Image: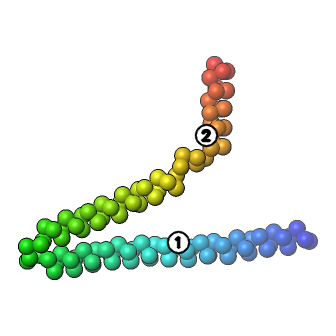
Amino acid sequence: MQHFLFLTNCITVWQQEKKRLRRVMLMIALAVISGVFFVAVVTAVIMLLTWYTPYRYVAITLLLLTYALGVGLAILRLSRLSDGESFTATRAELARDIALFRDST
């Protein structure tokens, strides 16, 4: 009986976590979409304000440099997060498997 209650509780907790994860993923998607729209609107406003001025090319250049800096920082951050130590146990197991296959042939 206790085993059944434990399994029922685990299933309930799992379903709650799935719902929570869906809400979190939806909020992340909405945040990304909102961020993209915000950047697009700010870019459009800057371009509209500077289009008929002699600073049009300066504005375009500064926007491109700002976006390039943002992309560069994002790539740097991602490269620091993936330090090459991902899946070390899996890679070690695959290396042992490859060695086993080479030794058997």
Nearer to me, 89 or 11: 89
Q: Is residue 17 left or right of residue 63?
A: right
Q: Is residue 51 left or right of residue 8?
A: left
Query: How many numbered discs?
Result: 2
Residue 62: x and y in percent read: 22, 67
Q: Is residue 76 left or right of residue 24?
A: left
Q: Which residue is labeled 2 in the image?
A: 91
Res 1 → quadrant: bottom right
Q: Residue 63, relative to residue 37: is it above or below?
A: above
Residue at figure coordinates x 77%, y 70% from the top left = 10
Residue at figure coordinates x 52%, y 55% from the top left = 81
Q: Pointer 1: residues within 10 angstroms few (<14), some, or many (20+)?
A: few
Q: Which residue is labeled 1 in the image?
A: 25
Q: Report the amino acid beneath label 2.
A: Arg
Q: Residue 75, relative to residue 2: is it above or below?
A: above
Res 30 → quadrant: bottom left
